[in-house]
Image (spheres, rainbow, N blue to C red):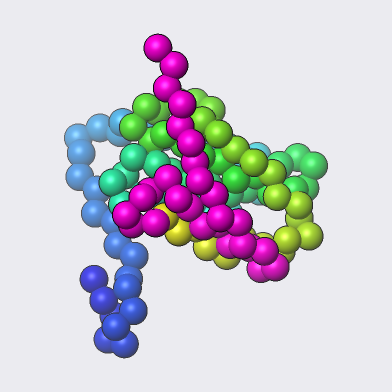
Amino acid sequence: SLQYRGRWLRNIFFLCSKSIFTIFTPYPASGILLTEISGSARYLITIGCSEDGDYTVDFWLWTLGGDKPDDSFKVDKNSGAPVAICFNPDIEEHIMVAFQKYVYLVVWVIIHFR
């Protein structure tokens, strides 16, 4: 939905009879600082602080419901606070992760082993 100035409002409407999967305290040092789910609800990205004080950007295949992230990378705390996570609407594996001083453009290559 849109606000009166034409900006998008973030809304979530979730209906189900039981919870399917929940992530409990992935970042004990800080809690989750920023999160975004892809338009298809297949991918979830979370950002929090690791014990060493740097930021950790975690990638989750949300439909699989794993206890640990499927991929991650560390960002130096000198990058500033996390500001935004954006998925490319056409290719959801292309992701922008923005901090106050740096922007990271990520192509998430998912390898499935049989």
Image-based side of 72 in relation to 40, left or right: right
Q: Position of residue 42 (x, y in %)?
A: 34, 40
Residue found 51% across the figure and 30% down from its top: 70
Figure quadrant of residue 51 = top right
Up/down of 55 relative to 19, above or below: below
On screen, residue 4 versus residue 106, left or right, reads left
Which quarter of the image is occupied by the N terminus? bottom left
**Residue drawn 52% across the image and 62% down it:** 84
Residue 56 picture location, percent across and down: 65, 44
Confirm whether residue 23 shows in the render.
no
Q: Quadrant of residue 7?
A: bottom left
Q: In terms of depth relative to the viewer, which is nearer, 33 or 109?
A: 109
Give the residue furthest to the bottom: 5
The image quadrant of residue 100 is bottom right
Reply yes or no: does residue 89 show up in magenta. yes
Give the image location of residue 91, x and y in percent: 36, 50
Task: Please state the total of marks drawn on the protein image.
Answer: 0
What range is drawn magenta here?
88-114
Front residue (pair 71, 56): 71
Residue drawn 76% across and 52% down? 76
Q: Quadrant of the C terminus?
A: top left
Residue drawn at point x = 51 percent, y = 57 percent? 96
Residue 53: % across, % down: 77, 47
Viewer can see residue 44: yes
- Magenta stretch holds residue 50: no
